[in-house]
Image: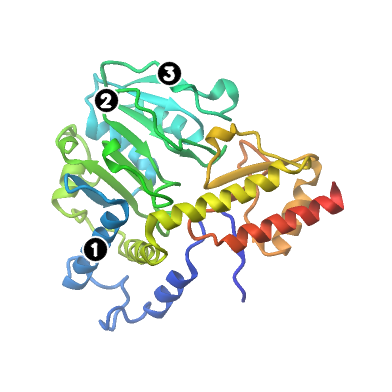
Amino acid sequence: MERIYNFSPGPATLPTSVLEQARDELLDWQGTGMSVMEVSHRGRAFIEFAQRSEATLRELLAIPAHYKVLFLQGGATLQFAAVPLNLAGPDDMADYVNTGNWSKKAATEAKRYLSVNVAADGADRDYVTVPDPTEWQVSDAAKYLHLAVNETVVGVEFHEVPEVSDAPLVVDMSSTILSRPVDIERFGVIYAGAQKNIGPAGITVVIVREDLLDRARPETPSVINYRVMADSDSMSNTPPTFTWYVAGLVFEWIKKQGGLTAMGERNRRKASKLYAGVDASSFYNNPVDPAYRSWMNIPFTLADPGLDAVFLKESAEAGLANLKGHRLVGGMRASIYNAMPEAGVDALLSFMAEFENRHG
């Protein structure tokens, strides 16, 4: 069966060559006569692979030596609790900026563990822009400042993270990590669920500055304690070995594409092309402030919402899958992560133009 273009926001499309390699190695990984899902995470073969995967990720992101890289379980959502448990006490305060669904959930979870100061809130403008950073009300007592760099639901993204606080900057980078170069030293903690640009769901990459490793509360569970997991090379318990393996293949794939500079140029081009198509039409609309439009998740509505179901049916028949918008927003959403080829965006634009000609 021919592969289609999958615009899912996550679990998202993976590079075809990565899937083919995983298929070819499924029954016999590195000549072991076993699947990578069957080998011991304590065995030399997997440990060497884990070390190579971390080294490749460090190379791609230019991660300095004074940052630890952790491969954890539980998805980015578990980090909503892990961050306050690792960085602050129950009587402490942290700043959170609310720019959409995921940053709001992170703040809500954090309130179970410490005091949360909502330094800025985009809800009053339906999250279609980022509140002016000059007006953020950060606290001098905050142990950290938390942001979601990209909101997948509404398609709002920080293209540059403002410098507004002396507190360590903690960011959810699930949907933008590895999509372009990033200055790691701007951040105290970066966390990212795998199922966008890293690999299958089931593993979370956490990049944490070493001076923040020893702040965890005594009651912090070992599997999310940054110090415990750093000291055990992310193997205090059995890691999700297959997901880690596929992630390692993706890291190598990105390197072969030319690294993050080339990836960023391609992602910018894909997004610009799709936004241009939407903006040139009176039939389609994207409400997001152009200064904060996401490269990764592009929502758009039809002039007649009554055509939504027809659009989804016909686009699926044309080999364009998972374009339905999030239930909180409606309309359509095209998620165009690293593994979405430019040809997929071209195919979507062609379909959109043809659909508008018939229904506009």
Which is in the foreground here, disc 1 or disc 3?
3
Q: Quadrant of residue 52?
A: bottom left
Q: Quadrant of residue 82?
A: top left
- The residue identified by callout 1 is 50
Q: Is residue 201 left or right of residue 7?
A: left
User: Marks 1/3: CA distance?
Assistant: 42 Å
- The residue identified by callout 2 is 167
Rendered-image quadrant of the N terminus: bottom right
Name the residue: 35% across, 41% down: 78
In this figure, which colouring scheme has been used for the structure?
Answer: rainbow
The answer to which of 159 and 7 lies nearer the viewer is 159
Which is in the foreground here, disc 1 or disc 2?
2
- The residue identified by callout 3 is 134
The answer to which of 46 and 186 lies nearer the viewer is 186
User: Marks 3/2: CA distance?
Assistant: 16 Å
- Counting residues from the start of the chain, the first of labels 3 and 2 encountered is 3
Amino acid at dot 2: Ala
Coordinates of residue 294 in the picture (x, y in percent): 53, 41
